[in-house]
Image (cartoon, rainbow, N blue to C red):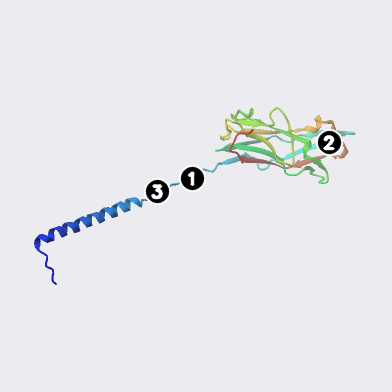
Amino acid sequence: MLLTLKPNTMKPLKLCLLILTLSSLSAIKLFAQETNLEVQFESRLETVLILNIDPESNIEFRIEEVNEHLYQITEQPDDIYFSVESTGNWNLSIASENPYFVGISDSSQKIPVDFLGFSVESLGTNWDNGLFSNIANYSRDTTLSLSNDKITVLTNGRRGNIGGAEKNNFVLRWKFVFEDEQAKIKRFDKMAVKADNYRGNFYIILSETQSPSQ
């Protein structure tokens, strides 16, 4: 059977096709809007820690036996100046490289490193007077014995110790602690130390910290 479409029946068909076309375009547009991607960026700024110190720094002193069982330090070890530059809070520790100071002329001559003590004095503007200041200085008003183990000396206080060299500027001073302890004087005598220049190396360890000292 042959189907003949009359002119008046063509218009609704075109309108229907137009509506379908518009509906399809709207659906495509809506679908495209729903597939937008949301991109997030995350970055972490690493803390910068810089220790400024003369790389040739070491500990050297001379000892003499001026009388029987009486010894004298005739050349004191030099003070060590250093500074810290940091964009984050930090801790600082000190350790001897070896457990003994060794004679330069006679390497068989050895003196334990705990015969030497040290303290760190702040020369910068960061306040080093305990937990509630910028820096907790454990050597403030005292002397710590040098050790082959790491000894924490400076830590951040609640005010934070972030800053450049003008804020974190220090001097490391050495002191012979055996002079204050009778037991160590006896130990020193038993070693039969000979006159010599004695030398040792040390480490300053700088590390990042996230929380104030406790």
Residue 38, label in figure:
3
Q: Where residue 63 sits in the image (x, y, percent)?
A: 81, 36
Q: Left of 75 or right of it: where is 170?
A: left
The single residue placed furthest to the left in the displayed view is 7
Q: Mark 2 belongs to which amino acid?
A: Glu
Q: Position of residue 9 (x, y in %)?
A: 12, 61
Circle 1 sits on which residue?
A: 43
Q: Which mark is residue 164?
A: none
Q: Could you classify mark 2 by the number of other residues whose Cα lies within 10 Å: few (under 14), some (14-19), or many (20 or more)?
A: some
Q: Quadrant of residue 153?
A: top right
Which residue is under mark 2?
64
Which of disc 2 and disc 1 is earlier in sequence? 1
In the structure shown, which secondary structural element does the residue marked by tag 1 occupy?
Answer: loop
The N terminus lies in which quarter of the figure? bottom left
Residue type marked 1: Ser
The image position of residue 168, as x and y in percent, is 60, 33
Please provide percent x and percent y for residue 164: 56, 35
Residue at 14% in and 58% down:
12
The amino acid beneath tag 3 is Glu
Please tell me which residue lies in front, 170 or 11: 11
CA distance separating discs 1 and 2: 60 Å
Alpha carbon distance from label 2 to label 3:
76 Å
